[in-house]
Image (tube, rainbow, N blue to C red):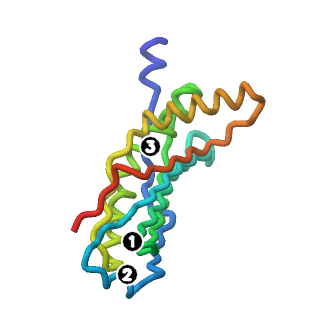
Amino acid sequence: MSEEQETQKQFAIQKLYVKDASFESPDAPNAFNSKQWDPKIDLNLTNSQRRLEGDLYEVVLSITATVTHQESTAFLVEVQQAAVVSLTGFDEQETKYLLGSQCMNILFPYAREVVSDLSVRGGFPPLILSPVNFDALFQQHMQQQQAKQEDGEQEDGVQDVSVQEGTELTH
């Protein structure tokens, strides 16, 4: 690839925003009565992307965290952190990587902050999400898509990951 073609590549974030956020505490105020706080956290991460127009894409990182304590749901928090990005001069594989991995690396700290803030506003300790290796998740997704294509299935543009360990609540 020539230098001229290489310098034409541009990746820019046009807008960052919270697309959706919700917090539920179905067992409140009973959820606050326990002296020993020993929660179980079920974390689900999903990302999606869609082309808007031209070189503009919307990317969305969705996080759902369900926190249970003593057999009941203490709280449930859902966040969709999104961005509009422009990608110019990248081939299809590079575009998929930027949208499916690098954009998620950018969105995650923002989503993590919203999750933590909502848990505190709900009266609970902050839910601090552990870092996520989106590069590894992207590679895993691409391998799954390749296997599906070999079986004749269609690529869907959505990655879905469930995480049950490596997440912590702090007092």
In the rendered structure, find residue 31 and report the number of the disc placed on it: 2
Is 68 drawn above or below residue 46 in the view shown? below
Instruction: Judge depth for marks 1 and 3 and give the one in front.
Output: 1
**How many numbered badges does the structure rendering display?**
3
Three-letter amino acid code of the residue under disc 2: Ala
User: Do residues under tags 1 and 2 come within 8 Å of each other at their CB atoms?
Assistant: yes
User: Which is nearer the eye, 13 or 152?
Assistant: 152
Residue at horizontal 48 percent and vertical 35 percent from the top: 98
**Mark 2, residues whose alpha carbon is within 10 Å: few (<14), some, or many (≥20)?**
some
Three-letter amino acid code of the residue under disc 1: His
Q: Is residue 66 left or right of residue 53?
A: left
**Mark 3, residues whose alpha carbon is within 10 Å: few (<14), some, or many (≥20)?**
many
In the rendered structure, find residue 69 and report the number of the disc placed on it: 1
Residue at horizontal 44 percent and vertical 54 percent from the top: 15
**Residue 13 placement (x, y as % from top left):** 43, 46
Q: Give the labeled residue for mark 3.
A: 103
Q: Give the CA distance from mark 3 to mark 2.
A: 36 Å
